[in-house]
Each structure stands twice: as structure tokens, then as C-alpha cells.
Image (cartoon, rainbow, N blue to C red):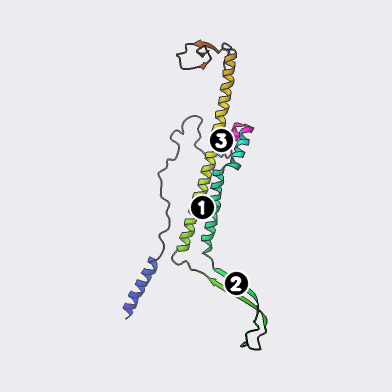
Amino acid sequence: MSQTRASMLVLLLAAVLGCAVGPNYQRPDMAVPQQWAHADQPGLSAGVVAVLQWWQTLKDPMLDALIERAVHANLDLRMAATRVRESRALRRVAAADQFPTVTLSSAYSRNRLSANVTTTPRSIAPEYDLFQSGFDASWELDLFGRVRRTVEAASADLAATEDNRRDVLVTLLAEVTRNYVDVRGFQHWKRLLSGNRASPLVGIGHENSECSLSKAPASQEFGAKAPGSGFFRKEC
């Protein structure tokens, strides 16, 4: 009989352990290089550079204003931030199952008996107040790890949505800065071309004051084109 009881206890213990929800998460080992492939090039640093507002290194107030407007008005970034708030709320809901649940209820009603009822005892007044109250408490013991795994999954979803918001922000900042730099470059070339049309043989006057423009045949594919005069090329 004792051997039978021991066998039953072993089977019961195995069944309880088999109900546990999965093993603990183990982060996989990734073969990541210790340094950049071209870290030995001059001007590059292998360390971490803390540049949070990198576009301010250009020292352009108009670009700073455009970045601020884009961050506050971009709809994709707002949607990403809304998803982060949603994930935080879902995680709080999942974490709430770790604690007892308490429910309180109350009700009040004013009652009046009909005058046509003749079977009512005399001890009951025709009009009376009725008060009701209730209390309920429950707590699920997380013996098999269901609640714990649910919280871990919600935390992972929250981290994913936060990284997605940062990805949208980085893309937005890069696009605004790139487009702004392109516009500034086009404006610079427009000023250069306007000066070439006004005086095509005047020196450039930038880094080398001896550089000048000379006419080249129209078949050559470089330089700035002037109406009716082929192309111009820079000679230094």
C-alpha cells in the first residue's frame, strides 16, 4: 500500500510540474565583432559618441525649427507614440493579475407597495428604502507561471513598440535633414549658375581665386551649361 501511495505521489508531482508554462527565456549568443571593420581609418572613433541632437552640429536655426515642427506634427510619429501608450496599458492590465482582485458593489432603491395588494403583512410599511452592499475578493496563485509569462510577453511587446517609435523618429530626423541639405545645395548651385550667366568668364573666387571658367564644346558632359554657348568648365 505504501508503495502504491508513493507511486501516486510521484505521478501527481510529475503532472503538476508538467503544467508549468515553458522554460525561462535565454538570450541567444550573437557573434558580434568587437570593433568596426574600418575602425583604423583616420577620423573615426570606436567609442560611443553621445550626440542626441546631432542636427544641431550644423548650427542652422532654420533646420532646428523645421526639426521641431516635424517632431510635433508628423502623424507617423504620433501613431507610434500612441502604440507605445497602448502597450504600456496592456502591460499594466497583465501585471494586475499578479495581485488580488477586490470587487465592491452597492445599490439603493426606494420602494412603494401597491394599494391593491391585500396579502402584505401589516409589519411592512407601504413605503420603504432598500440598501444592498456586496464584497468579493479573489486571487489566482500563479503556480504554473501563466501570469508571469503573460507579463513577460507584454513587456517584450512594450519594448518592441518603443524601439519602433525610436526608429520612426530617427527616420523622420534623417529625412528632414537630408531634404533640407538638398534644398540648400540646389540654392547654392542656383546662385552659381546665375553668376555664370551674368559673367561667364569671371573667376570663381572661393578656395582658389585663380580659377576661372572657359568655354568647352557642348559635347563634353561636365560643367555648367549656358544658353546658346555650350558648356563651361573650371580651369585653375
Q: Which residue is mark 3?
A: 176
Residue 200 inside the magenta-drawn segment: no
At 38% across and 70% down in the image, what residue appears?
A: 13
| CB under 8 Å between discs 3 and 2 | no
Q: Amino acid at mark 3?
A: Val
- The kind of secondary structure element at disc 1 is helix
**Nearer to us: label 1 or label 2:** 2
- The answer to whether any part of residue 149 appears in the image is yes
Q: Which mark is residue 158?
A: 1
- The kind of secondary structure element at disc 3 is helix
Mark 1–mark 3 Cα distance, whole angstroms, equals 27 Å
- The answer to whether any part of residue 204 appears in the image is no
Q: Which residue is mark 2?
A: 105
Hey, which quadrant is residue 12 in on the image?
Answer: bottom left
Above or below — where is 89 with respect to 1? above
Main secondary structure of the magenta stretch: helix
User: Dot 2: few (<14), some (14–19), or many (≥20) neighbours within 10 Å?
Assistant: few
Q: Amino acid at mark 2?
A: Ser
**Nearer to us: label 1 or label 3:** 3
Q: Position of residue 225 (x, y in %)?
A: 52, 16
